[in-house]
Amino acid sequence: MPRRDPFKGCDDFRLARRPVELTRRQVVLGGLSIYAATALGPSRLLQDARAQAAAAPDAPVLVSVFLPGGCDLLSTVTPLDQTGRLADLRRSITTEAPAPLATESRVGLHPSLSEGLDGGVRGLFEAGKVGFLPGIDYANPDLSHFHSRHFWETGLITERTAPGWLGRWLDRHGSADNPLQGLSLGGLSPLLRTGGAPVATIDDPAGAQLRFGGTWGPAADMTVAAWSRVAAETPGAGAGPAAAKRAAQLARDIGDRLAPYAPADDNAPDPLAPPVAYPENSDFATHLSRLAGLLAQPLGIRVAAIDAPSDFDTHDDQPKQLAAALSEVSQGLAAFQADLEARGIADRVLTFVWSEFGRRPQSNDSSGTDHGAGGIAWVQGTRARGGILTDYPDLRRLDREDNLAVTIDFRRVYCSLLEGWLGTDAAEVIPNASAFGRLAVVR
Amino acid sequence: MPWSEAHVRRLFWRAGFGATPAEAARWAQAGQDATIKYLLDGARGLAGPAPLLGGRPLDPLNEWSHRALWWLDRMVRTRRPLDEKLTLFWSDHFPSVADTPLVLAQNRMFRARALGSFRKLLGAVTRDPAMQVFLSLADSTKEAPNENYARELMELFTLGGGYTERDIREAARALTGFRSKWGDGGLQRIWFDPSLHDAGVKRIFGRRGRFGADGLLDLVVGHPRHAPFLVRKLWDFFVTEPPDRATLRSLTRAYRQSGLRVAAVVERILRHPALYARLDAPDMVKCPLVYVAGTLRLAGLGVTIEDYSWLLEQMGQFPFDPPSVAGWDWGPAWLTSQTMAARVRFGNAMLAWNDHPPLEVPDGAGDPGLSPDAQLDRALDALGRPWISDATRRVLVDLAAGYFTDLVKPWQQGKPRQQRADMLQRSLRHLILSGPDAHLH
């Protein structure tokens, strides 16, 4: 793949060519219906993804988990050595005592982070599989959700539209053909917006299948072929038409690639059935479960993104809201980690959990906290560097806006993930990368 | 300006939910002035009978999926499509996630004020129970003001920039004093309690005063950034090309001179030539609600199946449930591989699922004797003549032409041929209503 300027959108988008001519397709498929055909056709289509995966079967995968709304540092990873000052600041919030840690005395974790398999995120921390990054943010933090989120998504402190930082990495190091290389579950993550490289957005493989009901046999095959031909021949000039054309092409391509992993019908076994129990009634956990199953297949997934439920904007009733949100996150992430380990792929998957900012040290009168600086993120995985990886902000030294001091720039972590985990030069993706220094986040 | 059916179709899609062939003919005849007057001042209310699901009327207060269907039905049956379209605009501009009775009341408020004074709308939004609860205005007190609403008021609702963190904190003080009372059925009422209001002097945008909620709202709408901010957002809702500077200036002036009336801006946008650019190649992506409501309207269908509710959710626009306080992401962002698969699924709901789907092509309804062009015409007629590009037309005519060619044996004539003709109509209709062209207007 030719190298491109990673900071510029690219207009040379193209998709893998698919043999859509009726004659060719009919030869390949004979008289089979599309339902039978999907089992046959895609295995051929899979070959390019498989070839990529085979070329680098142990290629590292980075998974982003976003905690929308601005996760509160002080209640999530609580500084046990600053409890007096903390109690003064958080007068309107009564929280359960943080859970102490077997391996670290300076901080305790929100009790909800003990929920899930093997002690949840706390269990993972004590097993050395989680490295916390308290105080993460950037200089002169912007307390708007949307500005701050945009900065984190793009890795650029600018309000200009730009591809996501992992999208730029795909533009540089990804494939021109395989949309599954950048996989969002539950909605396109702006992190994975690219300047040209194809990416995929799905809920699950079954939902990705294109079916035209009320037709069968050769008629169904001809309909699918016509869908592809319409998508290919539609001019797609301008942003809207181009998006419609691309989505039509990608929907077909991704449906084909994932067909082997979609249950044939409602009663058929799930080809991606997880080896561990995930929590029920959680879209977040379901998406993690689908992702773990797909990561174990030769699909060439390199970066993936999932959003946690958007309950972290705890202006009101923080004790209840945060407990529920962290519980869902802890249970989901613990199951995901156990799943990856059970499938024997944990050593090539690193998860990065982040939020767009932290919250004000002083609580408000609605038992909540307003937007603040100095937040919390963590790396998780068998190859993550465990422990408390950054300086915890000093509660006696707030900034001019009465916010926590920022102790690490998130772009330092991005550069470290790019170089230490994905193994590529950070300067290709993050402008002025050398200025941010590096932090060991993997081992 | 020349005025044709193509102009009417463009206007009705952008300012509403599409034009049926009869509407396109009628308003092309009536001329631009009459058409725009109809959109701005037409008779209110809904056309036709209320939908029945399983023989019963919609019950949005008690059935979760019905609140989405209730709003969708308004879009399909409205006699004031522009009001309905702007109700959607304001729901996205002032998103609030709250209990059903609150969001339904808010929705009615948006509809009633859709084209009126922005300042009055903003006052109503600030006191609106759904918003009060969603952005923590209720029970924000002088002891510890909650900044949630103050920040979004400036960033998302009125200015977009040109204020400081201090302005936000001071504005939060001005907004204190609202209280809420809750009971078994949820929120009971919101009222203003002067004893909890911070009546002290605030300094906002460099002005000092004992501002309260209304004083603050006067300040934000009087801020020089407000008029260009709102005018631009309205423009982008209707037109894909960015406005040139002169257009932006004149719209801003018209907005201010009218006393911040939304209708003054919208009418000028609806008359602007940029709205009618490239009539033969629509380039704005339909949001899921416009896509679904427009498909139903053109086909002459009502809200007769419950599936539209979860299909809208899968397409990324579950009514009354915007993803964040910034509303939905519009434009090309509506279309991903995932949401496109959901739009194809919508085609299945229209054509194939259940015993009698809304666009059912019953067995035996196809006609194997029609020419390929006539087959396509028949499918387009059934859908209310939606736009398709020349490229799509070519592919679909080819599809119709080749659809029967494998049926060569004597035993494949008769019933197999009839079945194939039925399937051809399903294929064509599905490809028209979910192919790439269907998502543009």
Image (cartoon, helix red, strand yellow):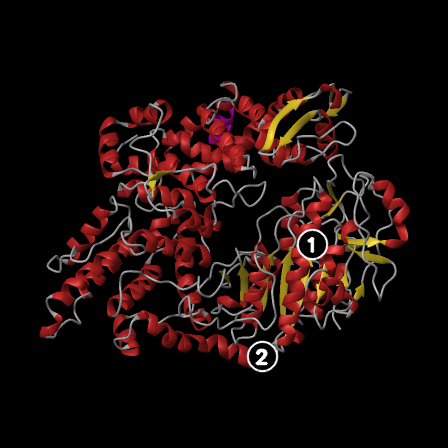
Q: Which of B361 and A300 is in front in this view?
A: B361
Q: Name the residue under label 1.
A: A326
Residue drawn 40% across the image and 68% down it:
A265
Residue A413: x, y in percent?
A: 73, 61
Tell me the kind of residue under disc 1. Leu
Q: Magenta stretch: dominant SS?
A: helix
Which quarter of the figure is the C terminus of chain A placed in?
bottom right
Mark 1 surroundings: few (<14), some (14-19) or many (≥20) residues within 10 A: many
Label 1 residue SS: helix
Range drawn in magenta: B242-253
In front here: A368 or B227? A368
Q: Alpha-carbon distance for marks 2 and 1?
A: 35 Å
Check the image and report above or below for B153 versus A98: above
Residue displayed at 15% across by 57% down: B364
Q: In which quarter of the image is residue A367?
A: top right
In the picture, measured across the screen, residue A342 lies left or right of residue B90, that is right
Q: Position of residue A33 (x, y in %)?
A: 29, 71
Residue depicted at 54% across the width and 64% down the height: A183
* Residue A286 position by quadrant: bottom right
- The x, y position of residue A221, in whole percent, is 29, 68
Q: Which of B173 and B142 is in front in this view?
A: B142
Q: Is residue B19 above or below residue A82?
A: above
What's the mark number on residue A296?
none
How far across and down, in percent of the image, does residue A271 sit? Answer: 48, 73
Q: What residue type is labelled 2?
A: Ala
- Mark 2 vs mark 1: give the one in front: 1
Disc 2 chain ID = A
